Image (cartoon, rainbow, N blue to C red):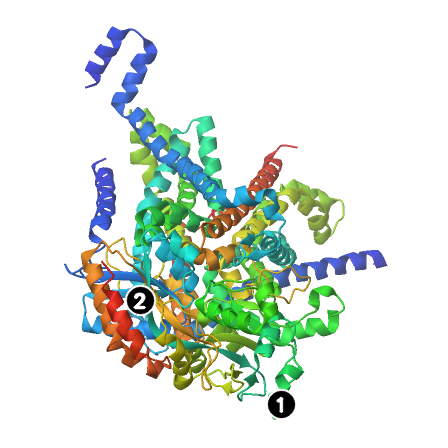
Amino acid sequence: MKRILQVYGFCLCLLAGGVVWAPVPCGAAPAADALLINGAGATFPYPIYSKWFDEYHKLHPNIQINYQSIGSGGGIRQVLAGTVDFGATDGPMTDEQLGQAKTKVLHFPTVLGADVPTYNIPGFSGELKFTPEALAGIFLGKITKWNDAALTGPNPGAKLPGNDIVVVHRSDGSGTTYVWVDYLCKVSEEWKTKVGKGTSVNWPVGLGGKGNEGVAGLVKQTPNSIGYVELIYAIQSNLPYGRVRNSSGDFIKAELASVTAAAAGASKQMPDDFRVSITNAPGKTAYPIASFTWLLVPSTIQDGAKRKALVDFLHWMLTDGQNNAEPLAYARLPKEVVAKETKAISEIK
Amino acid sequence: MASTAVAVGGALRQGRVRAFFLRWRSGDEVAHLLTLIFASTIILLTVLLVFELYRNSALARDKYGWQFLFTSTWDPVFEKFGALPFIFGTVVTSALGLLVAVPLGVGAAIFLAELAPPRISDALSFVIELLAAVPSVIYGLLAMFTLVPLLRNVVQPFLKKTLGFLPFFQGPNYGVGLLAAGLILAIMIVPFIISISREVLLAVPVEQREAALALGATRWESTWKVVVPFARAGILGSIFLAMARALGETMAVTMVIGNDPKITSSLFAPGYSIAAVIANEFTEATSDLYISALIELGLVLFILTFILNGLARLLILATQRKGTAQP
Amino acid sequence: MNYRSVWRKSVNAVMFSLTGICALAVVSVLVFILGYLVWNGGRAINWDFFTKLPTPVGETGGGMANAIVGSAKLLLLAALVGVPVGFIGGVYLAEFGGKTFSFLVRYTTDLLNGVPSIVMGIFAYTMIVLPLQHFSTLAGGLALGVMMIPIAVRSTEEFLRAVPQSLREGALALGASRWKAVATVVIPAAFRGILTGIMLALARVAGETAPLLFTSFNNRFWSHGWDQPTASLPVMIFTYAIAPYDDWHRQAWAAGLVLLGLVLLANITARVVLGRKLSSAAG
């Protein structure tokens, strides 16, 4: 009898001990000032963000900024629901979404990036030139073969096979999608009426991949496929990507200079809330599918420590942080935007 | 201790009250109450679950009504949501999974129950049960890197060449798609069919087999014409159970189904299942209606699996009763 | 021998060989899974995997130390929820239950068992993540705990029922009250079985990914305490598998091997301890 009681007592102690003791060995004793800030959102800037948060953590070991790339739609949603401390998106919030926010949400541009058409064509790994009509036609499902006239026309030297094109798009709510379809709306009337623009659209054709990572993964594994990803994903996955014809008629490759050129016009006339579209921007050297990407920060943050940390991070991001952008193929923010933003940070209370 | 209880109880002169008091003192009533409380939390949790599903899907239910189940558009931009593509994808992949798993599973169960010596039968069925323990995400991982390339490079071109006149095997060849999802589901549900079918087959009274053999049947004829029909209800029950599992599978399906909410006749085409769309889009549903539509999908899935599980249990129970009933 | 009986005999041989092939096919799938995982995962496992945190996107190296600890924390929480409710609920059904209420409890247990894991995730999201306003280990652990309950209840009840009635009667005859008989005689007799049932339930929820996707979310750093998002092995496998980075694929195989190894270890230990087949209906 006594032994049975001892066994039961032991089990109860185990249970109680588990509750109390477990947090201690799990991830080292939480230091008195250890701060964890949670953010979620766009996969478009995920490589630079993860680099930034890692670097910032090295500078401030007691601050951990945990960012999860779940797509811009997720960033917007979670910031509206208040389940994360900040969000991130490449498709700026609509007025309707801003209206749903309990506390006002501020947009802070971080870097400039580009959507590139990346493809996997067996036997061909060169650079293709895409016209706006070709891109719209492919994603509408009207151009179905790689050796269609719309593709062979601008690429006379390329040996394109007669295989079916496999379209890959995003399955999750995505700012990368937003940038892509924003561009397609501007260059294709049919796309504008049939599909429209948003972080998630009703795609006429194609496979869905989760995140930029998922699309790049699918394109890499699926022959005859084409998808749209942020530039760095194509580079890091060793996937070829094409040039796109801009509004001046030139076929431009996505790179630092052309992306910066796309933002030149808009940065001089940046609206106060920083929400602006730079797709199909004017300019001879401008890349047509470029975009700012934003951090979504509530204008009122209750937790003093978190507020201080976020404000400090934003200042760091605008100064030292910009140095990390170019090695990862993101363009720095233009000077005018940085100046305007530095002032806007003080709006966070 | 007991003496005071008896004294007080005696003074009350009511047998039942006295007995209750005695039970209380001895701790039985407390124990009963305690265990009852824990058991009722299970009921509470289930009721809460259904209630939460119902409540949070109210927006979508009010807006679409029953049409939700028959609309095939899923358009977050223009906020038009319909469940049909997902119901289609879920049902097709599960049906495909069953199509492959049932013959395989019942065949293996017959082998294990009728032919294999008991020790080998036990060992093999243990190994097969280990298959049921493999997590879904690991099936997905393996399917992505082994099954999908196999389908894309070998199986689907072969099917296209030989059976390409059928609408099921036409269309572009992605590798991922309904066929891939169906096949991985088949592998995942086959252990359930085998273990339950084997149990019900073993539960068939030996007199049935002996009677058949005594009448001159071969082993196979006795199995196929007597034992299996006797256990028919239980085997059917295991199939329903497997189907319920297949309907709810999330991770493996998400990784290989192609994530495209379209209804097509080709098995090579990408599709979308209810569980997969919830997994992909839940954290990003940017409007309340969007999330409500996703939760309504969850409710639909819940009801489907509920009905199937209920039927399954009834059938299995019926066979077990039949097996133990006296002739 | 007339033609008909030759035919019947050959049908007999052919059909039984076919069923044998079916069984062989199923078993070989498992062998293939194990072999492939061991081959790919084994090559990828190194000391870093168990000790380092993930590196920034696109950079190679790093490990899943936080995911391993995260999964352990989630399982601990799941056990804290699932074991008491499951165990004591099972005791109720086997020992104290009244007729109608027992039926109700069994029915809802079955219902809970059949709930798809993604729906369980929705439930935990609406109940815990939304009110608390952030993702947390707590939410993930509770989702897993609720999933554990039906399995724990079923196996506890089954093993308690398997205890011979004579043991109970003997205890009662010696003057023990009902609860004492149960607590001191019946439960210890079924202890081994109940423990292995709980271990199997834990193994089952250890591999669940869907309920964690929007409850415990994910975390590239260590997760402190219970109210922060945490990395977990299944979610990391999913995230890394669908990405295009080869180094992430490598780590996904390693994680898959670790996870599968633990799950299979639990199952095999259960079998060895009990020495007989457990009810498959608990699956």
User: Which residue sits at x=55%, y=81%?
Assistant: A120
Which residue is pictured at 39% across the width and 53% down the height? A99
Identify the amino acid type marked 1: Lys
Given residues C169 and B85, the one toward you in this image is B85
The residue tagged 1 is A159
Judging by the rendered image, the residue that carries numbered circle 2 is C220
Residue A53 seen anywhere in this rendered image of the structure: no
Establish if B277 lies above or below A257. above
x then y, percent, for residue C15 = 70, 59
Q: Nearer the viewer, mark 1 or mark 2?
A: 1
- Quarter holding the N terminus of chain A is top left
Q: Residues within 10 Å of mark 2 (few under 14, many from 20)?
A: many
Query: Given the image, what chain letter belongs to the residue carrying mark 2?
Result: C
Q: Rounded to the nearest whole Å, what is the CA distance between mark 1 and mark 2?
A: 44 Å
**At 62% across and 74% down in the image, what residue appears?**
A137
Q: Please identify the residue farthest to the left as the structure is shown.
A: A32
Q: Mark 1: give few (<14), some (14-19) or many (20+) Cα within 10 Å.
A: few
Q: Is residue A319 visible?
A: yes
Residue A69, image quadrant: bottom left
Circle 1 chain? A
The location of residue C76, given as percent across then percent down, is 30, 52
Count the marks: how many?
Answer: 2
Residue B230 at what x, y percent from top left?
Answer: 67, 42
Looking at the image, residue B16 lies above or below residue C161: above
The residue furthest bottom is A157
Figure check: B91 above or below C152: below
Kind of residue at badge 2: Arg
Instruction: Please tell me which residue lies in front, A157 or A276.
Output: A276
